[in-house]
Amino acid sequence: MRHIFKKYSNVLPPYCSDSKILESCNKCLDSPCIGVCEENIIKKDSNGIYLDFKESGCSFCKKCAIACMENSFGLLDLTLGDKIVATIQINQSKCLAWQKTLCSYCLDVCDNKSIKFIGSLYPEVGESCTKCGMCKSVCPVDAIILKS
Ligand code: SF4
Ligand code: SF4
Ligand code: SF4
C-alpha cells in the first residue's frame, strides 16, 4: 500500500480523487479507459493507471469515466467534476518568459484562461486551473510542474 501511494504521488486521471482505488483498478485487465482516451494520456504500468502529459492534456471528454462505469468496476466517478486532483507550478528558472525570452505557448493553449502574464511578462497559474495539463504538454522547456 505504501508503495502504491508513493508511485501515485503523481497524477491520477480525472473523476478520481483517491489513489486507493488503484487496488481495485489493477484488477481491471481490459483497462477500457486507456483505449477510449481521445488525448492518449492515460497510461498503465504494473502499479496502475496514471496520466502522462507528454503528448497532450485532458479535454474532460468523460470517455474514461463512462468506459469505467460500463465496466463492472465503475471506479471513476463523474460527480467529481471536470478537474484533476494535482498541484501546478511554473518553474521560473526554466520558463522562457520568466527568463526574458518571448514565449506564450501555455497562455495560448489554456482554454480555461487560467494563465495570466504578470505585467505582460511573467506567467502565473490562477485559481481557475483544472490541472488539465494542456500547458504542460506544449511547454518547450518542461517548465510546468504538475503533480499531486
Ligand atoms: S476525460 Fe477524456 S481526455 Fe481526459 S483522461 Fe478521460 S478520456 Fe482522456
Ligand atoms: S510555455 Fe513554458 S516556457 Fe513558455 S511561458 Fe509557458 S511555462 Fe514558460
Ligand atoms: S493552466 Fe491549468 S487549465 Fe490552463 S492549460 Fe494549464 S493545467 Fe490546463
Image: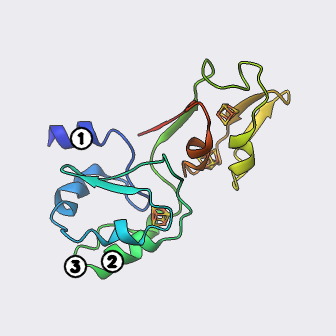
Q: Where's residue 91, x and y in %?
A: 58, 25
Q: Relative to 38, is 58 above or below?
A: above
Q: Nearer the viewer, residue 25 or 57?
A: 57
Q: Is residue 16 above or below residue 31?
A: above
The scheme the figure's colours follow is: rainbow
**Residue that label 3 marks:** 72
Disc 2, SS: helix
Q: Earlier in the sequence, mark 1 or mark 3?
A: 1
Identify residue for label 1.
5
For the point 78% across and 33% down, which residue is it? 117
Vertical side of 143 occupied by 32: above or below: below
State the quadrant of the N terminus. Answer: top left
Which mark is on residue 69? 2
Along the polypeptide, which appears first: circle 2 or circle 1?
1
Amino acid on which the number 2 mark rests in the picture: Met
At horizontal 75% and vertical 33% (from top left) the residue drawn is 103
Quarter of the render that holds ligand 2:
top right
Q: Is residue 77 above or below residue 112?
A: below
Measured from the top left, where is residue 92 in percent x and y?
63, 21
| Cα separation between marks 3 and 2 | 7 Å
Q: Measure the alpha-carbon separation of dots 2 and 1.
A: 24 Å
Q: Are marks 3 and 2 in contact (CB under 8 Å)?
A: no
Of residue 31 and residue 1, the one placed in the foreground of this image is: 31
Numbered label tally? 3
Relative image position of residue 82 (x, y in whole percent): 53, 62
| In this rendering, position of residue 36 left or right of residue 108 | left
How packed mark 1 is, by other alpha carbons closer than 10 Å (few <14, some 14-19, many 20 or more), is some
Q: Is residue 146 left or right of residue 118?
A: left
Q: Which amino acid type corresponds to the residue marked 3 in the rendered image?
A: Ser
